[in-house]
Image: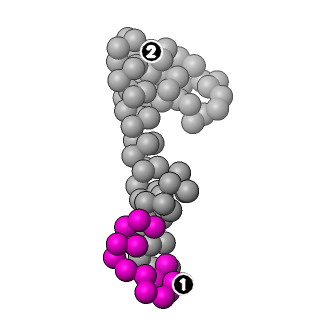
């Protein structure tokens, strides 16, 4: 894929917006089945990053902030509030 991206300028130098080069190349220069795999890989990477970010926020709020705000905040409350915070952030 990266080798193809470097040659896209030869085929179509005016791709706007330029951040769509991967998707444009996958949909126009690859066979359909390969374009689907490439676009699926891009989407799975994006969703993985979003899930990691939501998990990080939920964990940070439940373990770093909530125990200082609410007295008697226990481990069972931590897991529950972490899941609630992840849902709210999502």
Q: Is residue 87 visible?
A: yes
Counting other residues with Cα less than 10 Å from the Cα at mark 2, is it few (<14), some (14-19), or many (20 or more)? some
For residue 58, which numbered disc appears in the image?
none
* Marked residue nearer the N-terminal end (1 or 2): 2
Mark 1 to mark 2: distance in Å? 55 Å
Q: Residue at x 54, y 84 (%)?
A: 69
Asked if the magenta segment contains residue 58, the reply would be: no
Q: Is residue 79 above or below residue 9?
A: below
Most frequent secondary structure within the magenta stretch: helix
Q: Is residue 6 visible?
A: no
Q: Which residue is mark 2?
A: 29
Q: Residue at x 39, y 46 (%)?
A: 48
Horizontally, residue 2 falls left or right of residue 28, namely: left
From the top left corner, tell me how far across and down residue 6 is, in percent: 45, 30
The figure's colour scheme reads one colour
Asked if the magenta segment contains residue 77, the reply would be: yes
From the top left corner, tell me how far across and down residue 21 is, in percent: 53, 29
Q: In the picture, which quadrant includes the N terminus?
A: top left
Q: Which residue is mark 1?
A: 69
- Which secondary structure lies at badge 2? loop
Q: Pointers 1 and 2 in contact (CB under 8 A)?
A: no
Counting other residues with Cα less than 10 Å from the Cα at mark 1, is it few (<14), some (14-19), or many (20 or more)? few
From the top left corner, tell me how far across and down residue 29 is, in percent: 45, 15
Q: Is residue 79 above or below residue 37?
A: below
Tell which of 87 and 25 is nearer to you: 87
Which residues, given as a range, are shown in magenta?
Answer: 66-81
- Which secondary structure lies at badge 1? helix
């Amino acid at each position: 894929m990266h080798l193809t991206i470097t040659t896209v300028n030869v085929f179509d130098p005016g791709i706007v917006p330029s951040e769509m080069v991967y998707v444009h190349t996958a949909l126009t220069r690859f066979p359909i089945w390969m374009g689907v795999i490439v676009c699926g890989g891009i989407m799975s990477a994006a969703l993985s990053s979003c899930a990691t970010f939501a998990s990080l926020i939920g964990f940070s709020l439940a373990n770093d902030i909530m125990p200082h705000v609410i007295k008697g905040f226990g481990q069972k409350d931590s897991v529950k509030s972490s899941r609630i915070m992840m849902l709210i952030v999502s």
